[in-house]
Amino acid sequence: MSVTATDAVRRVPVGLGDRAYEVLIGPGLLARAGALLADLLPRRRTVVVTDATVAGLHGDGVLAALAASGIAAKLIVLPPGEETKSFEGLADLCDRLLAETLDRGDLITALGGGVIGDLTGFAAAIYKRGIDFVQLPTTLLAQVDSSVGGKTAIDTPRGKNLIGAFHQPRRVLADIDVLATLPPRELRAGYAEVLKYGLLGDRAFFEGLEARGADVLAGDPDALGWAVERSVRMKAEIVAEDERETGRRALLNLGHTFGHALEAETGFGGALLHGEGVGAGMALAFRFSAARGWCDGQEADRAVRAIAAAGLPTTLAEIPGAPFRGEALLAHMLQDKKAEGGRLTLILARGIGDAWVEKAVDAGPLADFLAAEGAV
Ligand code: NAD
Ligand code: GLY
């Protein structure tokens, strides 16, 4: 890699032995993509998988950057949106990769948000029994979460991310500059995942976000670089310790079981973005923890205030489609991969920066809590 120590690049190692890789964070990385990826591309060719929105904004720039290092690249442009992360989307992508006659010595480049990263990573995991790929995440959510850690998947009508594989990327280039074109609502949704790291295990980071969150959401490059790096460092550390989610990695699901239920009730579409569901879900997780006496009420209020300050929903009433049926929300939560015998696994909190995995949450108290939160 031709990045020198003087470059304003923050580097976070993901320590996974012979599958270790680095996440590079900083401005101007896509403009240098060729130089930053050349060592992984001895054949000087790649296929760049992206969606139509990202292709229009950043596709030509990435192709030019690759060409500048003598790397021939072709764009595969998919429709934007969660629907692309489907069996149909996967079949279409695999067919188009085969048409490019890529073989196992080649490498696929994912350029986009979590939809493109998850789908392309899964295609890379199964294409000719596995081919390398790199992630060029273009949403805040993808930079701080989905591009790191090797979870790849597609959705089915029965639920999200149910078919997938662990397949680690060879490198991640998180270019802060690309976030300038991201719609503010998408930036806020990604910020929910940033707050998640502070709330689950890093009180000092949470306090930093209380001070600098407005700058992050205003797109200030220094604040963004700092927030992305702190987030990626925590994710990398957790993934290195528990790649397959047999233990601590489950903490990264703070707010997700509540959030998924809300996403399911709102149809997994534009009504509630994933990060918005996570924001509301984290608020519910803190209030449930307080209601059960596990978390101090003032701590829960402080967590909820930070979520609300980012313009994210914190109550059921704020979510399109409210009021929700408590039974329907509970049914979605009981479908969670980790629910067993009418008991759920939830990530709960003793306080800010102190989450734990509770494996025996009874449905009864949860139903009462949802009713108190306004579910009918
Ligand atoms: P996304 O990929 O759908 O991107 C959101 C929207 O922003 C899309 O319309 C996209 O075209 C557009 N966009 C992307 N980059 C842009 C840019 N720089 N400028 C302007 N527009 C841009 O959504 P997302 O929020 O990035 O990812 C959500 C997905 O990530 C979900 O499918 C979720 O399940 C998955 N996810 C995966 C993991 C994991 O560990 N693998 C973790 C969290 C979420
Ligand atoms: N986004 C949760 C995880 O990567 O484990």
Image: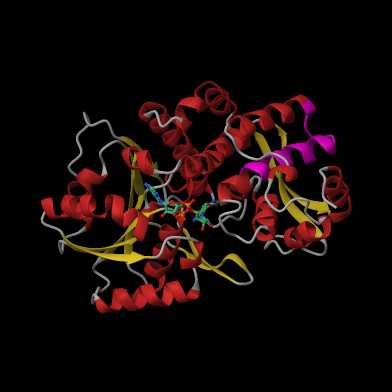
Of 173 and 17, nearer the camera is 173
Give coordinates of residue 9: x percent, y percent: 29, 34
Residue 3 relative to residue 246: left or right? left
Which residue is at 44% across, 49% downward? 142
Residue lying at 46% horizontally and 76% vertically, measured from the top left: 88
Residue 206 falls in which quadrant of the image? top right
Horizontally, residue 191 falls left or right of residue 72, namely right
Q: Establish if 67 lies above or below 104.
A: above
Colour theme: secondary structure
Q: Position of residue 78 (x, y in %)?
A: 37, 66
Is residue 347 toward the left or the right of residue 209 in the image? right
The segment highlighted magenta reads 279-297
Within the magenta stretch, is there residue 294?
A: yes
* Vertical placement of residue 230 versus 163, above or below: above
Q: Split into 4 quadrants, where in the image is the N terminus?
A: top left
Question: In the rendered structure, does residue 96 fall within the stretch colored magenta?
Answer: no
| Left or right: 373 in relation to 84 | right
User: Horizontal and vertical percent for residue 59?
Assistant: 26, 55
Q: Which secondary structure class fits the magenta region best?
A: helix
* Residue farthest to the front, as pictured: 321
Q: Please give the name of the residue rendered at 67% of the width and 38% of the height, measured from the top-left corner.
A: 355
Q: Is residue 333 above or below residue 227?
A: below
Please indicate, yes or no, whether residue 170 appears anywhere in the rendered image: no
Rendering coords of residue 63 (x, y %)? 20, 55
Instruction: Please tell me which residue is depicted at 78% across the width and 54% down the height of the picture.
Output: 324
Could one spot residue 128 in this view of the protein?
yes
Task: Work out whether 90 lies above or below 316.
Answer: below
Occupied quadrant, residue 108: bottom left
